[in-house]
Image: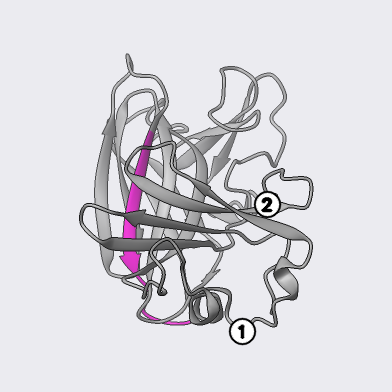
Amino acid sequence: GALSANQSIAIGVNAVTDTHLVTTAATIVNGSFETPEAGTWFITYSTGANIGGWTVTGDSIDVVGTLWGASDGDQSVDLNGNNLGGLLSDPIATVAGETYRVNFELWSAGTIEVSAGDESATYTTVSAAPWTQHSFDFTADGASETLSFDSISPGGAGGAVLDNVEIVRVLENFSLGTGGDVLDLSTLLESAAGAPQDGSAFDNGWLEFDTSSGVDTTILFLEIDRTLLSE
C-alpha cells in the first residue's frame, strides 16, 4: 500500500561512481531481543525454545538483561549459552530475486556464521573491541526467507554477543530524473513500497537532502514538523 509512518526509504547517490542505492525497511521480529525480559541477569534457553521471533538452535543461548550494556535497547543475546548455540528467525517476507541487507552488531569474543537460503558468511569479534556493526547481503529465493546466526567458536559458555538485527531490501541502479538533483520517484516508490503511489504519502510531509556524509546524498522522509519519519 502507500508509504506509511512505519516504512522508510533511504536513497543514496554516489556522485563519483554514479551508482544509486535504495533501501526499504523489511520486517524482522524482536531484532533487539527485548523479549523475553531477563531482568538484571540472564536467562539460558536450550535448543527448540522460542524467544519471540526466533527459535534457539545448537546447544543453547543466553538472553542477557542489563548485566552489560546492550547495543540497542536493554537486552542482547550471548550465542553461547552453555555451549555453541544459535538463532533461527521466523520467516521474513521477501521478493524473489531481490537483494536484502542484514545489519547487526557484535560484542565480546567469538566467531559466528550468518546464513539465509544457500548464502552464508562468517564474522569474528574480539573481547577488547566495543560493539561493532556488520552487514550481510543475500538474494531472496522466494516469498520468504529465514535468517540464522550460529556460533561456531569457541566452545563452552560465553561467546559472541548479538544485538540490533535489522533487515532492509536493497534496490540498485534506478534511473535519475531530469534536472540534476531531481529524482523521478514515481516508479521507484512503486517498486520499493509494493504498490503504485497516489501522492498522498507526501501530502503531510517533506523530502530533505542530507549531504552530511560528504559522499552520498540521502533523501529523508520527514513529518510535517520536519522530524524524521519514525521507523
Give the mark nearest the N terminus, 1 or 2. Answer: 1
What residue is drawn where x is 35% and y is 80%?
A: 97
Please tell me whether residue 126 is drawn above or below residue 111 in the rendered image: above
Disc on res. 138: none
Q: Which residue is painted at 60% across and 59% down in the image?
A: 8
Quadrant of residue 198 within the rendered picture: bottom right
In the rendered image, the vertical position of residue 13 relative to residue 130, given as above or below: below
Image location (x, y in percent) of residue 18: 25, 61
The answer to whether residue 58 is seen in the rendering is no
Q: Position of residue 142 (x, y in %)?
A: 42, 82
Specify whether 5 is left or right of 68. Answer: right
Q: Is residue 162 left or right of residue 99?
A: right
User: Would you place residue 113 above or below residue 42 in this image?
Assistant: below
Specify whether residue 88 is painted magenta.
no
Which of these two is toward me, 72 or 212?
Answer: 212
In reply to whether residue 139 is colored magenta, the answer given is: yes
Q: Which stretch did the figure color magenta?
A: 133-143
Quadrant where the N terminus sits is bottom right
Whole-Å distance between the Cαs marked 1 and 2?
20 Å
- Name the residue at 60% across, 17% down: 67
**Residue carrying label 2:** 222
Q: Which SS class for mark 2?
A: strand
| Callout 1 secondary element | loop
Q: Which mark is residue 195?
A: 1
Residue 139 image position (x, y, % from top left):
33, 71
Residue 148 on image: x %, y %: 41, 56
Amino acid at circle 2: Leu
Amino acid type, label 1: Ala
